[in-house]
Image: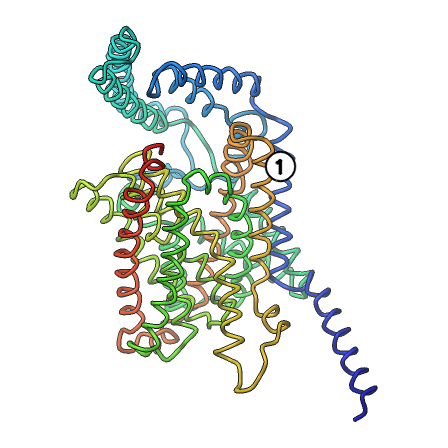
Amino acid sequence: MNTNTQTHKTNEMVIDVSKSSIRDLWTNEDYWAIWLGFLILIFGLFIFFPNPPKDMNQKISEANAIMQSEADIAPFKTIAWHQAADAKHKLKANNVGFGKKLKSYVAAPHNWKTNPVDSFFMNQKTADVKNIAVLSVYAEAKAKTAELLKIAKFKENAAKTTFYKNDTLNAETITAIDTWKKAKTKESSLKKKINKPFNLGIALVGLCIVLALLFGIGYKIMGNNFIKFIKGFWFVFILAILSYMLSAQATMKAYGIGYAAWAIAIGLLISNTIGTPNWVKEAVQTEYYIKTGLVLLGAEILFGKILSIGIPGIFVAWVVTPTVLITTYWFGQKIIKIPSKTLNMTISADMSVCGVSAAIATASACRAKKEELTLAVGLSLIFTSIMMIVMPAIIKATGMPYILGGAWMGGTIDSTGAVAAAGAFLSEKALYTAATIKMIQNVLIGVVAFCVALYWCAKVECAPGQKVSAMEIWHRFPKFVIGFIGASIIFSTIYGIMGSDVGYTLIDQGVIRGLTKYLRGWFFCLAFVSIGLATNFRELKNYFKGGKPLILYFCGQSFNLILTLTMAYIMFYLVFPEITAKI
């Protein structure tokens, strides 16, 4: 074959690849996850940005002026400083106008104790009956907060008379203010428990229709059957509702059994008994749902928040995580000798990075089987439920500093929601530290997916003497990660331009907590239901031989717990204690 012929064929291949890449923009599931995710984010921007709380900028300016003035006067955060900060935090775009209604349209079933109907509907009469006990406890908490505020003011005035030169009086004031703040937090928590009438019936039907059309249109353009998808979607959505309802039961919430565990369990029960009906299978689209949810998750990862906790948090998340990932994979291959490298890698990423999100991205990069992904997710959910209850208890029992405990939990508990719940068991500082560490860790989803794709092309599936193909890495790389990273960059930029105060009001408490966080939860729940419906125990039993996956997860997580705690202590208390003092 002459050179001209070779060149001609090479050019034809380049053209074919180029056409294929362009066609992928509307036929590839990963790209559709990006388009749908960004469509939702843009919709959120148009809803919340033009409708800020009344006099938002003026109230923020007044609060900041008070906080600055108080900071210049006293060597600690005064009562006036805290009250001004609270005034800013009350400014939420999701509490005004259509944004307030939108929350009710996308909300999940409510909490309940004995009657599951309470999860979907409550009239004024029922709410009044339930509120008799709640209002009594709330009134007591409110009175106690007022009393503690008086004590804190008395202490602060005493310290003020000495121009804050008396260390003893300053210390007493700080303690009194902290006690008042804890009581105020408890009062706010009880206030949220006051029942209000609601009816989710119409909202859930509307949400089902909107989501069916949203995913169905993309499914059709990708070349699939739209009608069959719609027929099956309502069944998957009902199971998602049921999963949310069961997780909202008081006892289930107390034990940390979330919607993910219920969704997979219900799906598995159906698929392994009566079998998943054929007419439902078209809507069992695990990756389609969860990839779209992960694009929305990207908007929640704001660089400003990452930097707020500083270098200690970055060390805990970005040094420990890859170390644990690589060590666990090596342990699985060399010591336990797990036959499937893809299963080994998926479990390692799930356990070391951030649970299900990392497992999905990694499974796509190394092309793991769906049964392997299901197994990794199942192990993650079991350990997460245990750790979110046991770890706060250990931290309290040992007298561990709550910031250290928060960093420990943020770096080891797999689920973002479980991390927040575990942190809330301890204190606000623990919650803040844990959630921020987990957010920093979530950034690694894209990095890990790329590195796994590169490693698989270069080492695992590369024949001797074969060169690594950049195109093969590109085809293997999960494209939805581009949307995840892009959403993070765009929203971080917008947040930075607006400033933290306006960003908190319009993005944190607007676009994210008023819309995308709810929808992300629904998308994840649909994905977990799909995992269960698509999985048969007979397909999984081969992977459990010898208990190797369980041993891998247990050993890897044990190493993760030890290394994360050690790194957190070194970074937060030995190397950067001044940063810890400011949290």
Please tell me whether residue 284 is drawn above or below residue 172 in the rendered image.
below
Foreground residue, 92 or 192? 92
Residue 375 location (% of width, % of height): 37, 67
- In the image, taking residue 303 as reference, residue 568 lies left or right, namely left
- In the image, taking residue 450 as reference, residue 79 lies left or right, namely left
Residue, disc 1: 45
Q: Residue furthest left?
A: 397
Residue 253 location (% of width, % of height): 30, 44
Q: Secondary structure at mark 1?
A: helix
- In the image, taking residue 531 as reference, residue 39 lies left or right, namely right
Identified by mark 1, the residue type is: Leu
Q: Which residue shows up at 52% across the image and 65% down it? A: 281
Foreground residue, 514 or 159? 159
Residue 22 location (% of width, % of height): 73, 64
Q: Quadrant of the C terminus?
A: top left
Residue 405 location (% of width, % of height): 27, 44
| Quarter where residue 377 is shown | bottom left
Q: Residue furthest right?
A: 4
Q: Which residue shows up at 29% across the image and 76% down it? A: 336
Can residue 230 be seen here? yes
Foreground residue, 111 or 396? 396
Q: Which residue shows up at 45% across the image and 31% down it? A: 198
- In the image, taking residue 307 as reference, residue 472 lies left or right, namely right
